[in-house]
Image (cartoon, rainbow, N blue to C red):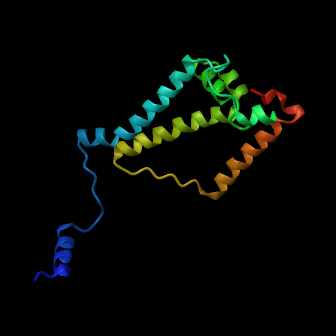
Amino acid sequence: MRDVNADSHQSQRLTPPGPKVTPSGAGAVLGRLAVPAGVLAAVAGAFAYVGTVDPNEPGHYPVCPLLRYTGIYCPGCGGLRSAHAFVHGDFAAALQDNAPAVLGYLAFAVLWTVWVVHAVRGRPMRIDPGPVLMWTLGASLLVFTVVRNLPFGGWLHP
């Protein structure tokens, strides 16, 4: 009869102690870049589609349900128009359509670049924004939403 505990102790001795070492060849680097490249391809494809199919023409995209049924602009209203203007290089129109979305595009670009640098170096990417940042972002979006729906916030309408 075999001792199950002896087998588990044997398997533990086969793995060397210490930090896990990431392989560092050209193939390993390309393997680590596969996921960031896939994410970039998906985002670029979405931006290419929105850049080609104009959201300013009715019938191409669904209408925001909150805007349709209540007349209130949500924080995402104008996001597709903003992306369309951004793709075409009209940054002023992109900011006017949805300024937080433009900040989101720029934040994505920065985070994606940091992700690629970490992947090339073989380090894991860890994002831990913390509660203060999350509450600040939430409060900012709430203030943006309230102001864009008040009479003096008409310049924030998409």
* Relative height, residue 97 to residue 4 (above, below): above
* Relative height, residue 55 to residue 150 (above, below): above
Q: Is residue 144 left or right of residue 23?
A: right
Location of residue 3 (image quadrant): bottom left
Q: Is residue 127 left or right of residue 34?
A: right
Q: Nearer the viewer, residue 121 or 6?
A: 6
* Rendering coords of residue 96 (x, y %): 73, 26
* Rendering coords of residue 44 (x, y %): 48, 27
Q: How many marks?
A: 0
Q: Is residue 142 left or right of residue 151?
A: left
Q: Quadrant of the N terminus?
A: bottom left
Residue 73 seen by the camera:
no
Q: Nearer the viewer, residue 107 or 73?
A: 73
* Rendering coords of residue 139 (x, y %): 74, 49
Residue farthest to the left, as pictured: 1
Q: Quadrant of the C terminus?
A: top right
Q: Nearer the viewer, residue 122 or 141?
A: 141
Q: Residue at x 29, y 41 (%)?
A: 31
Residue 13 seen by the camera:
yes
Q: Residue at x 34, y 38 (%)?
A: 34
Location of residue 81 (image quadrant): top right
